[in-house]
Image: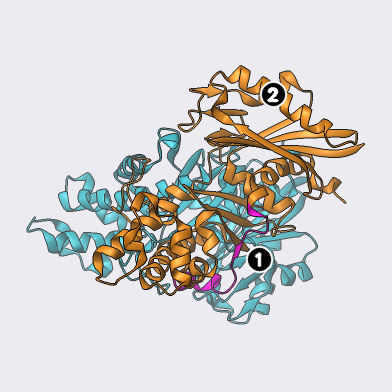
Chain colours: A cyan, B orange
Amino acid sequence: MKEVAIGIDIGGTNTKYGIVDRNGKILADSSHPTVSHKEIDKYVDALIDAILALSKTIGEELDIRGIGIGAPNANYFTGTIEYAPNLPWKGVIPLVEMIKERIDTHVFITNDANAAAIGEKVYGAAKGMDNFAVVTLGTGVGSGFVSNGKLIYGHDGFAGEFGHVTAVRGGRACTCGKRGCVETYAAARGLVLTVQEELAATQEETNLRHILPEKLTPKDIFEAAEAGDEVAKHAFEFTGKILGQSLADMVAYLSPKAIFIFGGVAKAGSWILDPTKKHMERNLLKIYKNKVDILPSGLPDSDAAILGSSALVWDELGLEELV
Amino acid sequence: MKEVAIGIDIGGTNTKYGIVDRNGKILADSSHPTVSHKEIDKYVDALIDAILALSKTIGEELDIRGIGIGAPNANYFTGTIEYAPNLPWKGVIPLVEMIKERIDTHVFITNDANAAAIGEKVYGAAKGMDNFAVVTLGTGVGSGFVSNGKLIYGHDGFAGEFGHVTAVRGGRACTCGKRGCVETYAAARGLVLTVQEELAATQEETNLRHILPEKLTPKDIFEAAEAGDEVAKHAFEFTGKILGQSLADMVAYLSPKAIFIFGGVAKAGSWILDPTKKHMERNLLKIYKNKVDILPSGLPDSDAAILGSSALVWDELGLEELV
């Protein structure tokens, strides 16, 4: 029997799931809309049915060692999803318990950024690292911190909200109600806002002027930078400055060996990583200088969500079992 | 035989040491000037001799389970003190190794704020807590973070420098070479600077005007506040605002159950703790509100350094052994 873990990534739009072996090879995967079932009971029924059906396509008998779930507002300690604004189910959803009622295996849940950190540790570029951070720059900014080889969950399961650390006191308004959060500068929308500010501050002719702000994506800005566009280059430089300054503070808290940067904005590669590294170094206490790597994720972007959530299973069952 | 741990606190001026039982009772303690021996070999010889002599004063046979040391710039992983500006020995001092050559027992070292955190965990108000922070407001600002029941050391042993997290971008010059560090506002000198700024900004008559800035202490400011002095009260309010804002970010990183505040500035009690709590709460993400306690240390101030360093021994040898 082949030992596998199930990885489930629950997003606002789609639920992705896959069957993953101990080496991080996805044997089969699929997805369906998260919103298809507004009643959580029916959603869970359909999800388990789909996973069991998927497992039969592999043509080999499987030993399902566990199910790992990455979801917004997920609480590792209680196994619940709590008041997730972008999911169709309201209130506190006891998802781990509901899945265990339907299938007899280990079930673990955490938020997507924590799952990404565990994915990096089990399959990715953080293998063997006991102290590192993962920062996801996507629609929002998420983070997962590993210290002494274990995720930092905090007392309530909600540690690791780097996106809502204050980068600029009194700065841009954040969806969370605060001002100047890292997310308002370093998430996709933050980068677009920075381009808007640059456009207002310069007469420079640039293609970016001719794209509606709500249509503008990090990919457009990346392509403009590649083509030599000064506004795009400045926007990445500014974003890297704000992000790097805040990462210098992260280092003073956690002294990680490496910080892995991940998500849509990170796809701009060195356009964003180079200024981030430069400004982090400038703001580091001397004892930390030239010791912390800023690296892209070691996981393939398209599979990262499934890999990360499945990795929870191997991590919880004990890495020492791994060959 | 009575099981004891030796606690040693190495400061720039004095080295304090004591013999402590498992319940945090100091059976005997003493101190001598740190600078008395500029050669580290002689310092260690004298220190070990003094500890052994002290242990003979107790009148009971002792089982010394280990030695714990708190010292500036101490590295837990390597057992060394590295380039400590305020100690008489230069370069990298392999103190743990040197002590082990002279006495056959377990020896552990960490910086003083980490020792304070372990002291809080083993003997103090953090007993049974797996996620908390200790912040020391003294000559500098130090911190120790406990997550999943273990100190966060980071990859190199130097995690937990909350004093050098940026509180105000471009703010006051710090001795570390950066600007706006928490320490420049919340350490003793930061509080005094705030009083100076308040005095310059107001015509208010106050006794604080008649004390030379270099003579002004947190105690003077506390006593003025107690007597109703508006400048002193404003200074604590401002300090609490800066500190509370930064603690809100700490919570977003670590989600501790409690933050213990310690050291000279913290002796002002509710004058500093109340505004700190208020401004922390104002800046917290909703999921953290009204969940994190700001508390004074549970260790007696005069004994905290010896208790903290001795606690390292019990913590390392395994709390599960404790009754």
The amino acid marked with disc number 1 is Ala
- Could you tell whether A245 is left or right of B71 in the image? left
Taking the spot 45% from the left edge, 33% from the top edge, the residue there is A291
Give the residue number, with chain letter if any, for mark 2: B99
The image shows residue A51 at horizontal and vertical percentages of 67, 62
Q: Is residue A126 magenta?
A: no
Residue A164 showing in the rendered view: no
Q: Of A242 and A249, which appears nearest the observer?
A: A249
Q: Nearer the viewer, residue B96 or A151?
A: B96
Residue B181 rendering spot, x and y as whole percentages:
38, 50
Q: Quadrant of the C terminus of chain A?
A: top right
**Which of the 4 quarters of the picture holds residue B70?**
top right
Amino acid type of disc 2? Ile
Q: Which residues are magenta?
A: B280-301
Q: Which residue is depicted at the point 58% across and 31% down?
A: B33
Q: Is residue A72 visible?
A: yes
Determine the CA span between mark 1 and mark 2.
Answer: 63 Å
What's the chain of the residue with tag 1?
A
Foreground: disc 1 or disc 2: 2
Judging from the image, what secondary structure is the residue with disc 2 in? helix
- Residue on which disc 1 sits: A50
Left or right relative to B82: residue B15: right
Residue at 26% across, 52% down? A238
Residue B308 position within the rendered picture, expressed as x and y whole percent measured from the top left = 67, 45
The answer to whether residue B142 is left or right of residue A172 is: right
